[in-house]
Image (cartoon, rainbow, N blue to C red):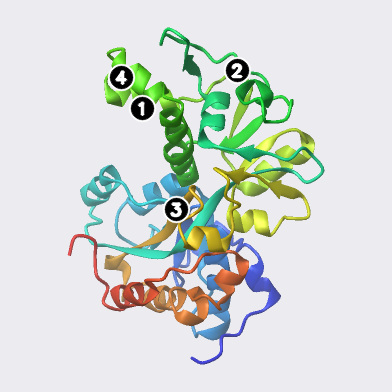
Amino acid sequence: MSLVKLTASALAVAAVSATAAAARDNVQVAGSSTVLPYASIVAEAFGENFDFPTPVVESGGSSAGLKRFCEGVGENTIDIANASRKIKDSEVKACADAGVTDIVEVRIGYDGIVFASDIKGAKFVFTPEDWYKALAAELPDADGKLVANPNTSWSEVNADLPNQKILAFIPGTKHGTREVFEEKVLLAGCEEAGAFEAMTAAGMDKKEATSKCVGVRTDGVSTDIDGDYTETLARIAANPEGLGVFGLAFYENNMDKLQVATMSGVLPSTESIATGEYPVSRPLYFYIKKAHVGVIPGLQEYAEFFVSDEIAGPDGPLAAYGLVSDPQLAETQALVAADKVMGE
């Protein structure tokens, strides 16, 4: 197809009732709130351009979506799980135990995790070390002993930061974004600060030290957000001194309300993520239940449409919304066309 018909509704998040989904004459998708707007754009465009019903796209987080995906095979289970991280070995095993043995992994592009605050507030220039020192439940003291985090303001964390109380809204543990935040910000910051080395030098094994690095304080300074980014945005609107963790695309579509911080001296953008210069970025995925291909109407067609040049390419609507196009998109297209499952 040379021309894809896109309307304003394609930019809206799909909201379809469970009763409509029960008919199973359409594709069912659930998972990552980061991937949700992209999948919704594709679902709406797919319904307008193909002789298949518009797919049902739901959120819930990467872990929750993959849990539903791994419940088994059949019309009462979802066809696709969206994820802002790779599927874990434990999830692949859970799938296999439930009869979901053939899974097609599809990388759709890249996204950055950004740190944003109220547009009228103070400006921030962060490093991972700043976030570790602000949010870690425990920090090593001068003698290497772990003590409760005493920091209450950003200026206590780093004298170059604003004298503003620490108030952070971060993704809850069911979100794939949380895992990337822990690995690329908290753990990286712990290592930058020398805390990981201090803990292991004091006799702590690496697994426990890693757990201490990513363990977040529970004294009210940091709040887990189990909903999507709109909830984080609402928290910042109600608490203008707060800082939130968002996907780049969400920030770029709310620049009238938010300002973004640099991380390690790099401003997040599609360009800095595409080059790998911005340090907190990650690939985005969806996972297809191969046993449903050829059974659920439109499933294969939807997957191929999603990764087509017209949709996922650098000039497509997903890039316009904020997705960083995958330079290896042609390889992904071939993988989807061949229904190549993980492990082959």
In the figure, is residue 314 to the left or right of 293? Answer: right
Q: Which residue corresponds to mark 1?
A: 210
Outermost left residue: 344
Outermost bottom residue: 2
Image coordinates for residue 117, horizontal then vertical, percent: 71, 41
Q: Which residue corresponds to mark 4?
A: 200
118 in relation to 201, above or below: below
Q: Earlier in the sequence, mark 1 or mark 2?
A: 1
Q: CB atoms at circles 2 and 4 under 8 Å apart?
A: no
Give amino acid for label 1: Thr
Mark 4 or 3, which is nearer the eye? Answer: 4
Q: Which residue corresponds to mark 3?
A: 282
Give amino acid for label 2: Asp
In the figure, is residue 83 to the left or right of 88? Answer: right
SS class of the residue under badge 4?
A: helix
Image coordinates for residue 57, horizontal then vertical, percent: 52, 62
In the figure, is residue 293 to the left or right of 227? Answer: left
Mark 3 or 2, which is nearer the eye? Answer: 3
Q: Earlier in the sequence, mark 3 or mark 2?
A: 2
Q: Earlier in the sequence, mark 4 or mark 3?
A: 4
Q: Tag 1: Cα neighbours inside 10 Å, few (<14), some, or many (≥20)?
A: many
- For the point 62% across and 62% down, the residue is 13
SS class of the residue under badge 3?
A: strand
Q: Which residue corresponds to mark 2?
A: 219
Q: Earlier in the sequence, mark 4 or mark 1?
A: 4
Mark 4 or 1, which is nearer the eye? Answer: 4
